[in-house]
Amino acid sequence: MANEDTSPKSPLANLITEAREGRLTIRMDLEKFVYIDRDCEYFKDQIRDIQTTMTQVAQQDKWGLGEGFSAQGDRDLVSAKTMVRRWRGKSRALDNSTGSDNSVYAVMESHYKVIEDFQTLFRTVRERITGIDTEQAAKYQDLEANLPQQAPAQAKIFSWPGL
């Protein structure tokens, strides 16, 4: 189950509380709840993959930009060392002493938490629906087990008239 922490830092905390207390209504087919939950898992997995890549970037020993002496006796470039240090900082997790709260890793972590909140919100609504109506609960379980996989929605980064 998704992280149940809905502290004030959570952008959807109020909506999750409203859903838990039965004051939020969402009209949606049960099929959509299955797909939303699957899509949330997919995007969370993608975020973890990106974070793993960023960790690997941060741990790269030699970048080959002139940041150190080579076997050919190339000179050390101060600007290359600066670039490598900045790129490592942009890729490291915040808990690392050289990471920043604006690193790719940290930004992706904030996206992960928002997706978890959406997942918790929709799960809470679905649980209220299926917790009250046993027929709906059975239908949801059947959909969850038998609904075919679908590709997650592809977001458009840019939108131009006519595209």
Image: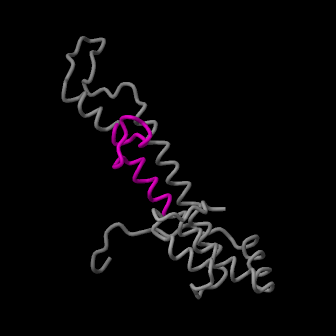
Q: Is residue 100 magenta?
A: yes
User: Eyeballing the image, is 127 above or below 50?
Assistant: below
- The residue located at (39%, 25%) in the rendering is 61
User: Eyeballing the image, is 97 above or below 14?
Assistant: above
User: Eyeballing the image, is 151 above or below 134?
Assistant: above
Question: Range of the magenta residues?
Answer: 89-114
Q: Is residue 74 magenta?
A: no
162 and 26: which is toward the camera: 26
Q: Quadrant of the N terminus?
A: bottom right
Q: Position of residue 127 (x, y in %)?
A: 69, 76
Q: Position of residue 4 (x, y in %)?
A: 61, 63
Judge left or right: residue 133 versus residue 14.
right
Q: Position of residue 100 (x, y in %)?
A: 35, 43
Please identify the quarter of the rendering in which residue 143 is found.
Answer: bottom right
- The residue located at (75%, 85%) in the rendering is 132
Q: Quadrant of the C terminus?
A: bottom left
User: Which colour assignment does the render follow?
Assistant: one colour
The number of callouts visible is 0
- The residue located at (44%, 57%) in the rendering is 110
- The residue located at (34%, 38%) in the rendering is 89
Judge left or right: residue 93 versus residue 151.
left
